[in-house]
Image (tube, rainbow, N blue to C red):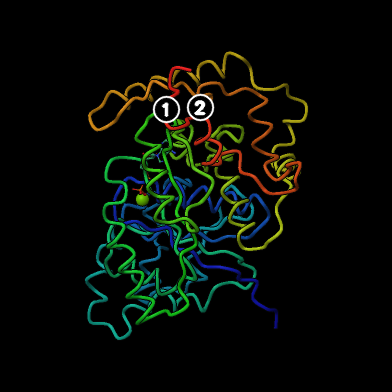
Amino acid sequence: MTQSKLRKRISVANQKGGVGKTTTSVNFAASLAAAGHKSLLIDLDPQGNASSGLGLDRYSAKTIYDVLIGRLNLEESIQSTALENLFVIPANQNLIGAEVELINAISRERKLKTALKNLPEDIEFVIFDCPPSLGLLTINAFTASDSLLIPIQCEYYAMEGLGQLLNTFQIVKEDLNEDLKIEGIVLTMFDPRTKLTHEVVREMKSHFKDELYETAVPRNIKLSEAPSFGKPVILYDHESKGATAYMSLVEEFLKRNSLPLPDWREKLAALFPEDSIQESPGAEELAAETESQMAELEEAAESPGRVKSGVELSFESSETSADREVAVSASETESGEWKSPYALERISEDIGDGSSADA
Ligand SMILES: Nc1ncnc2c1ncn2[C@@H]1O[C@H](COP(=O)(O)OP(=O)(O)O)[C@@H](O)[C@H]1O
Ligand SMILES: [Mg+2]
């Protein structure tokens, strides 16, 4: 008998919609896979965005719903993806029924945990993309998980609802899964040019000093485009800020879990052998990307509820090949200490307290 290689089962959760759960689930799992860790992403949202974002057929007969109602064995429902180490169990609207159908089932909160007994032994990480609610599906995910990864969008009322989420975490911990932990809180759609972002960082830091990840995921157009190509961003544009941010997030996660860090240069060279003969990205391509990102940022800054600080940072607008370099060599600092190229600290230093906005 071989031994299970399972290291961690992680729920990506926040009952607010549109905060970056699916984007984080898909790209966190894909970066883990690219780093060499066999990972299984389980789509638990009836909208099936993680499934379609990875190019899977949502109307497939093999979904997590079939597993939860006992029609399929978990192992039979696993599908492969374009990334060698990334596997997925898809979801579709059928899953809405599960919330109702399981209501009277015995151990209804433990269905997913029980199903995971059939997890293939070579899977190292399981990631659950939770739906935007704290219902039975989310409770099942929490019961089957070792930890929660909580994406928070940098916006007004960013913390609203967080109390409710942490309350559900406590209830599950007390009644169903005493070992459940908070893996971390990750800021998403980060835009260092707004004062608001800075305020959210400050507030999050004061409340969640240890839980808050140093790596923040910037707002990046490639992250929103990739799903329509059925790809994780690392396969869509592995040099984009979005891709490097998720690689960096995985590094921080591995570091926090005392696991060895990947050599991204080597991993990326294996994934994209044609890159070695290519020059750095064309200036035209970069200019086009920057322009569309700027337009997106400006639009966002003008919409109600957002404050434009007037501070111009080099975070998103000047993606040079030097920037790209630093992103994949995040672990190499002089002191030997790990440092994320997307570190909040660095951004806080850049932005100061806002008083030097015109400096
Ligand atoms: N860092 C980001 N930069 C740009 N767009 C993003 C980013 N993260 C998420 N998005 C976009 O925001 C929308 C909501 O994100 P999603 O991950 O689906 O959130 P959730 O799963 O919490 O509902 C999607 O259209 C997604 O493409
Ligand atoms: Mg989602």
Are discs 2 and 1 less than 8 Å apart at CB? Answer: yes
Residue type of the residue flagged with mark 1: Arg
Residue type of the residue flagged with mark 2: Glu
Q: Residue furthest top?
A: 284
The quarter of the displayed image where residue 227 is located: top left
Which residue sits at x=43%, y=22%?
A: 357
Residue 195 vertical placement versus 337 (above, below)? above
Disc 1 residue crowd, few under 14, some 14–19, many 20+, Cα 10 Å? many
Closer mark to the observer between disc 2 and disc 1: 1
In the rendered image, the quadrant that contains the N terminus is: bottom right
Q: Is residue 322 left or right of residue 42?
A: right
Residue 291 percent coordinates (x, y) = 46, 17
Q: Is residue 159 left or right of residue 304?
A: right
Question: Which badge, 2 or 1, is on the more N-terminal residue?
Answer: 1
The residue tagged 1 is 193
How far apart marks 2 and 1 lie (CA) works out to: 9 Å
Residue 266 percent coordinates (x, y) = 76, 43
Q: Residue furthest front?
A: 355
344 vs 324, nearest the viewer: 344
User: What secondary structure is marked by label 1?
Assistant: loop
Q: Is residue 36 left or right of residue 96?
A: right
Residue 212 percent coordinates (x, y) = 47, 53
Which residue sits at x=63%, y=60%?
A: 38
Which residue sits at x=56%, y=37%?
A: 346
Instruction: Indicate yes or no: mark 2 CB to ligand 1 under 8 Å.
Output: no
